[in-house]
Image (tube, rainbow, N blue to C red):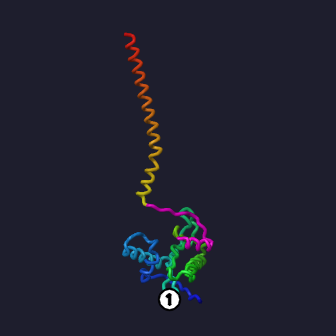
């Protein structure tokens, strides 16, 4: 079975419904209307920016996948530029047809056009296929990005802090008890020696 050609084009606002479905797992948790609004903004920003491209892959004229490309520093501390391929994704019905390779090739071509020496990407930690695909393309892990809510992190920090705090409270409590007992012994001796002299 011969493969159909994969074509790539800049995504438009008309593509947003497809993108919402494609990226449903990586969009912010909100109702569909908010997700549509978010993606409309992203599409418009990509169209107006020289440092962003939101590309839609088509297979035999049907939308089959997409990737957001952007030029960013390697990390906030390493200012070497990289073309970051954000959420390169292929719809399940078009997997195995070279769409993922075409999306990453678009990232390579853009990096070469810009003279950028690095390409980076991220695949969800639970996506075994995505991570294997990126590893086969020689993209090695540089960092593990972790996320949580401030309230949950605060609760965990609080749970970690009381252990040492409780230990220091116990030590302080023991010192205070020792001091109280020492004062009582002194008073007892004075009282006892005073009664013995009478």
Figure quadrant of residue 175: top left
Q: Residues within 10 Å of mark 1 (few under 14, many from 20)?
A: few
The answer to whether residue 114 is above or below residue 162 is below
Figure quadrant of residue 15: bottom left
Relative to 119, is 66 on the left or the right? left
Relative to 116, is 124 on the left or the right? left
Residue 85 in view (yes/no): yes
- Measured as percent of width and height from the top left, residue 182 is found at 43, 25
Residue 50 in view (yes/no): no
Q: Quadrant of the N terminus?
A: bottom right
Which secondary structure, mark 1?
Answer: loop
The answer to whether residue 150 is above or below residue 138 is above
Figure quadrant of residue 40: bottom left
Question: Is residue 139 in the magenta section?
Answer: yes
Q: What span is colored magenta in the figure? A: 127-148
| Image point (56%, 63%), residue name | 143
- Measured as percent of width and height from the top left, residue 103 is found at 55, 79
- Measured as percent of width and height from the top left, residue 185 is found at 42, 23
Q: Quadrant of the C terminus?
A: top left
Q: Which residue is mark 1?
A: 61
């Amino acid at each position: 079975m011969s493969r159909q050609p994969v074509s790539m084009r800049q995504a438009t606002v008309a593509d947003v419904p497809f993108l919402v479905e494609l990226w449903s797992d990586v969009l912010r948790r909100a109702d569909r209307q908010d997700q549509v609004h978010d993606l409309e903004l992203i599409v418009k920003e990509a169209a107006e920016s020289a440092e962003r491209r939101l590309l839609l892959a088509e297979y035999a004229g049907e939308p089959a996948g997409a990737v957001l490309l952007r030029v960013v520093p390697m990390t906030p501390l390493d200012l070497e530029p990289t073309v970051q391929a954000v959420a390169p994704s292929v719809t399940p019905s078009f997997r195995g047809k070279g769409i993922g390779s075409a999306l990453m090739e678009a990232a390579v071509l853009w990096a070469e056009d810009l003279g950028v020496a690095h390409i980076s990407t991220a695949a969800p930690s639970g996506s075994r296929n995505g991570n294997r695909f990126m590893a086969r393309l020689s993209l090695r892990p540089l960092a593990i990005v972790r996320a949580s809510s401030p309230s949950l992190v605060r609760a965990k920090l609080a749970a970690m802090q009381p252990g040492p705090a409780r230990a220091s409270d116990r030590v302080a409590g023991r010192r205070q008890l020792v001091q109280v007992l020492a004062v009582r012994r002194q008073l007892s001796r004075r009282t006892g020696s005073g009664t013995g002299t009478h």
